[in-house]
Image (cartoon, rainbow, N blue to C red):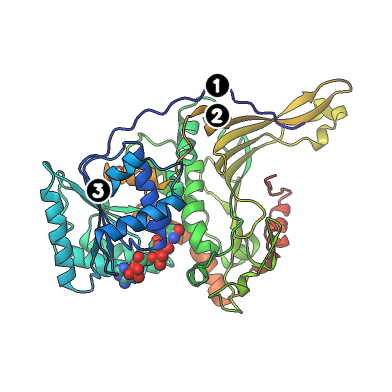
């Protein structure tokens, strides 16, 4: 029996957001890919929703000389490709007036001073005090130097009236040691309250809705524990390959690029205890506690509970695609993983003996991000004559992309005789209820940062706790680079060894239809 869905109610109009606090957003790396595809579209979307204040300015910083007009033309063309919906000309005109470009390589004090002068002139044009957000959309190697420069020019002096915040993009280090070094370098010139480590997954509505789902409803929390939950699966699957970013990706791999940050944060939100309030640090304290409770594997345990994979030539959307080692800028003998599956145990009262299976990869058959909580089977004896032995257990799926929503699978009787049972879904889709497509994550996070709300950002201790869990795996791989590595053809759900990993426990991956 398949689930049947219909639009349950007229869509609920979203309230107009309060405008963010006055701010100048300074983007370093403003000519790069992230700025073009994500940041400028997100800011434009906020402008369309009237969520930005009048006292708002973007100062795009780059190393290539360009006029304000030329930069506006570039952004306009980029929005044609990457913004959602037809152009709102009035809001674009509003937004474009606030876009400025400054050529400042920041390798010398002189260019930093020129930037400071421009920022002061912009501030002076506003009637009241204006906050500042510095966004680092540069390679990680450039960041520490620029931050130091900003500090020595007095551009990071943070006051309640004129907050100075810094948004840091992933990767937050390459391993535990480099993450600590980066945190230390930032800590030399910034207080932790000024540092916003961004993870766009946490800006997605469904991810935030996980907290509402768990803690604003009375019926789920009592069963959200080892007595009722059999196991949890967290999947972040992509159909794309490395998309021309082979050089960057080959240095990182799936463990560093996806598991240490996105997947661990999804796990933390799923497994955390209720916070004592929704204040930022109360929520973040609970998230980091879960990460600290994850069992740290010995090398032998790593070999039992981790599978790495690398795609070979295959098909994606019925089109032949090359293998990872044939991608541009990937070394032909690369041992970097494009897929990883792992089993983690959380050693606390709530989750003892409940496995959390995580997997992520490129060139998989579907683009899907979801958390699936599988409950224990019902006692089956009553339905023995009704194929009960083959019945699936209840399953709660929180889908983050695509089609954000939540569904609950349960058993129902198939009409007629004899008695037969089948799976049905109770499904909630965001777009059925709410009159706006969910945002890509950056809108929410940029808006939160302007308002000084760090709830959805990573704190230094969270980053280090994530690296702590990954460290034993990285050590096994460092000792033998092709350890745990298996091939899978593009278009398959990872290597067969990943299926064996979960099958050893008598379970199977939930592969999205
Ligand atoms: N692209 C994504 O979807 C994505 C997603 C998540 C995280 N990130 C992270 O975001 C950051 C930027 O990624 P990207 O893909 O946008 O990279 P990108 O396309 O290579 O752009 C990098 C930008 O940084 C500038 N830059 C390079 N070296 C610099 C230096 N030494 N000093 C000052 N500016 C410098 C470049 O300016 P020039 O034009 O002058 O060289 C360019 O504007 C990286 O940390 C990346 O890991 C990116």
| First reached walking from the N terminus: tag 3 or tag 2 | 3
Which quadrant of the frame does ligand 1 lie within? bottom left
Element carrying mark 3: helix
Give the residue at mark 3.
Answer: 97
Judge depth for marks 3 and 2 and give the one in front.
3
Give the residue at mark 1.
Answer: 9
* Residue 27 seen in this snapshot: no
Determine which of the numbered discs, if any, sits on residue 432 in the image: 2
| First reached walking from the N terminus: tag 1 or tag 3 | 1
Q: In x, y percent, where is residue 170?
A: 41, 59
Disc 2 residue lies near ligand 1 with CB under 8 A: no
Q: In x, y percent, where is residue 77?
A: 40, 55
Residue 409, above or below 80:
above
* Residue 420 seen in this snapshot: yes
Q: How many residues crowd around disc 1 within 10 Å: few (fewer than 14), some, or many (20 or more)?
A: few
Quadrant assignment for the N terminus: top right
Q: Residue at x 69, y 28 (%)?
A: 4
Q: How many residues crowd around disc 2 within 10 Å: few (fewer than 14), some, or many (20 or more)?
A: some
**Front-most of 511 and 463?**
511
Q: Are marks 2 and 1 in contact (CB under 8 Å)?
A: yes
| First reached walking from the N terminus: tag 2 or tag 1 | 1
Q: Residue at x 41, y 29 (%)?
A: 14
Q: CA distance from mark 3 to mark 2?
A: 36 Å
Rendered image quadrant of residue 282: top left
Q: CA distance from mark 1 to mark 3?
A: 40 Å
Instruction: Decide if residue 110 is on the left or right side of residue 265.
Output: left
Q: In x, y percent, where is residue 84?
A: 46, 44
Q: Residue at x 67, y 45 (%)?
A: 512
Element carrying mark 2: helix
């Amino acid at each position: 029996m398949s689930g049947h869905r219909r639009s349950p109610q007229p869509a609920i109009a979203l309230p107009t957001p309060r405008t963010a606090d006055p701010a100048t957003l300074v983007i370093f790396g403003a000519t790069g890919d992230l700025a073009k595809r994500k940041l400028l579209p997100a800011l434009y979307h906020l402008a369309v929703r009237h969520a930005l204040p009048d006292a708002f300015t973007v100062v795009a910083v780059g190393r290539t000389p360009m006029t304000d007009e030329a930069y506006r033309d570039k952004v306009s063309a980029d929005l044609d490709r990457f913004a959602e919906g037809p152009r709102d000309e009035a809001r674009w005109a509003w937004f474009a007036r606030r876009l400025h470009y400054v050529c400042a390589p920041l390798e010398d004090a002189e260019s930093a001073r020129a930037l400071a002068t421009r920022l002061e002139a912009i501030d002076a044009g506003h009637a009241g005090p204006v906050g500042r957000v510095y966004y680092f959309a540069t390679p990680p190697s450039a960041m520490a130097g620029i931050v130091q420069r900003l500090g020595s020019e007095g551009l990071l002096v943070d006051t309640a009236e004129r907050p100075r915040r810094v948004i840091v993009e992933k990767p937050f280090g390459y391993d535990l040691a480099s993450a600590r070094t980066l945190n230390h370098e930032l800590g030399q010139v910034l207080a932790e309250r000024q540092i916003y480590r961004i993870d766009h997954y946490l800006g997605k509505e469904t991810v935030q809705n996980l907290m509402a789902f768990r803690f604003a409803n009375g019926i789920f929390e009592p069963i959200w524990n080892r007595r009722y939950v059999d196991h949890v699966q967290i999947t972040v699957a992509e159909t794309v390959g490395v998309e021309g970013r082979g050089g960057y990706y080959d240095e990182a791999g799936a463990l560093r690029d996806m598991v240490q940050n996105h997947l661990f944060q999804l796990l933390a939100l799923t497994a955390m205890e209720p916070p004592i309030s929704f204040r930022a640090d109360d929520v973040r304290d609970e998230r980091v506690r879960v990460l600290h409770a994850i069992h740290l594997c010995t090398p032998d345990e790593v070999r039992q509970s981790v599978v790495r994979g690398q795609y070979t030539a295959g098909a994606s959307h019925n089109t032949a695609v090359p293998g990872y080692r044939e991608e541009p800028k990937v070394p032909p003998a690369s041992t970097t993983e494009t897929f990883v599956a792992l089993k983690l145990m959380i050693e606390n009262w709530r989750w003892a003996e409940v496995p959390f299976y995580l997997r992520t990869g490129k060139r998989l058959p579907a683009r899907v991000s979801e958390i699936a909580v599988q409950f224990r089977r019902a006692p089956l004896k009553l339905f023995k004559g009704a194929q009960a032995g083959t019945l699936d257990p209840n399953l709660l799926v929180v889908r983050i992309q695509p089609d954000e929503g939540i569904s609950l699978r349960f058993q129902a009787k198939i009409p007629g005789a004899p008695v037969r049972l089948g799976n049905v879904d109770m499904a909630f889709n965001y777009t059925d209820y709410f009159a706006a497509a969910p945002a890509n994550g950056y809108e929410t996070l940029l808006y939160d940062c302007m308002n000084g709300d760090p709830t959805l950002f990573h704190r230094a201790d969270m980053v280090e706790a994530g690296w702590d869990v990954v460290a034993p795996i990285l050590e096994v791989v460092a000792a033998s680079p092709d350890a745990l590595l298996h091939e899978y053809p593009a278009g398959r759900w990872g290597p067969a060894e990943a299926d064996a990993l979960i099958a050893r426990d008598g379970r199977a991956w939930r592969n999205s239809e």
